[in-house]
Amino acid sequence: MSQIDTERQLAVLGGAPLTEQNVPLGQHNFPDWHAYEAAFRDIFNRQYYTNHGPLAQRLEASLAEYCGVRHAMCTTNAEIALVLAAQALGLRGKVVVSALGHAWTAQSLLWADCEPLFCDVDTATGGLDLGMLESILAEDRPVAILAMNAWGGADNAAALRELADRHGVALYFDSAQSLGARTNSRRLGGNGAMEVFSLHSENLLSGAEGGVICTDDDALAAHIRNIRSNYGMGNVIVPVVKTSNGRLSEAQAAVALHNLQRIDEYLARNRSLFDSYSAALRGVPGVMLWQPGDETAEPTHQNLLLRVDEAAFGLSAAELALALRAENISARTVPVWLRSPVYADAARRHCQDETQAERLAHSLVQLPLGARVSVRQAEAIGRAIAALQAQAGSVRAALRRG
């Protein structure tokens, strides 16, 4: 059970912040400086900076082996990867996406001249609501499902595959935040026609930025490589009407390769921090650590999500996030992009009323967990949350006063 710190006045009530320096969200894993410097000296000596260089090729081979797939193709970022995936699949028409999806997920469909169809989620797992998905597939006849593995978790790939096969639609995955996660003891990467990961700094495997497309389909892999412009490098297997400057730089590949060597260490650290938070928050009314995915999922714990029951805790998730930011603890709620004016027409089709996705998102707060967070800090943040709950009435009044 968390011990409430009664000696320290909360920052929102006029006290000093819990920490002088901000504790950030995100993984932010970075190589040892000497290894980083040596890698960059090699890049400068070769004077080969991009266009599918030797480090990018080595990274692709290493990621294919790590994910257990035939092909891994690196790109500038994950949204470009999703656009290339839609293009390679030849998608034209409506594509089902999660109502809890990230901004880049639906945006990738707009760039590919497809129309997003929002499907609500199962609040227990964060995955697509299979009942609603079945109805959408029958009524709207979309051409594909773009499922999501988010926050280091994994959706029910087998159930999605069965539905996609039965309705004759393509299935691919936005797994941007979940590289290294497992489902049914197998690492993500080979689910659906393709699976896309992100190498953004906030994610477990960082290249500072970048994307990865994984597939076991040789023809799709060839198509992706032809679309991803390499200035003519690579055989033209299929004619393509569009190409994209989606190449990963050697600098990004160097950072990602060094981090891939330490990924098990990062996973162990994430688990240790998750356990520290869990112990610190045990017994605090109205909060629980929420992990996306079903019982088959083995998450990476790269994102720590706290689910808040406002009635029991005394503060909403948004109020808790504000109070923690006053303590110099980065905390944020989960945005729901389907209410953006860009998607207004698409949202009206199946998500006119408030969705389960919105109710879930409005109850979640993301807390710091990564390379810049220590066990002591995790424990201190847990105590701060307990103190905020114990003084919830005063905290809410202070927040409303501004």
Image (tube, rainbow, N blue to C red):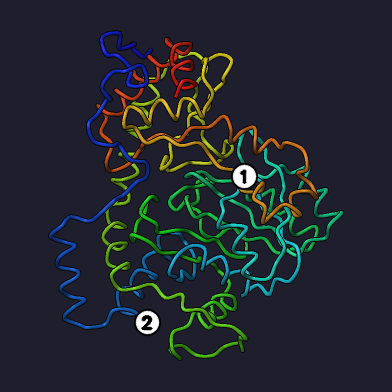
Q: Residue at x 51, y 54 (%)?
A: 188
**Based on the displayed image, in which of its 4 quarters is residue 22 positioned?**
top left
Q: Secondary structure at mark 2?
A: loop
CA neighbours of label 2 inside 10 A, class few (<14), some (14 to 19), many (20+)? some
Q: Is residue 283 visible?
A: no
Pointer 1: what residue?
Answer: 100
In depth, the one of 358 and 69 nearer the eye is: 358
- Describe residue 154's horizontal placement relative to residue 375 as left or right: right
**Based on the displayed image, in which of its 4 quarters is residue 374 positioned?**
top left
The percent coordinates of residue 59 (x first, y second) are: 35, 68
The percent coordinates of residue 315 (x first, y second) are: 51, 19
| Vertical order, 353 against 231 (above or below) | above
- Describe residue 183's horizontal placement relative to residue 109 as left or right: left
| Vertical order, 272 against 298 (above or below) | above
In depth, the one of 388 and 144 nearer the eye is: 388
Pointer 2: what residue?
Answer: 51
- Describe residue 248's horizontal placement relative to residue 112 as left or right: left
Q: How many marks?
A: 2
Looking at the image, the residue that sits furthest to the front is 401
The image quadrant where one finds the N terminus is top left
Disc 1 residue type? Leu
In depth, the one of 328 and 379 nearer the eye is: 328
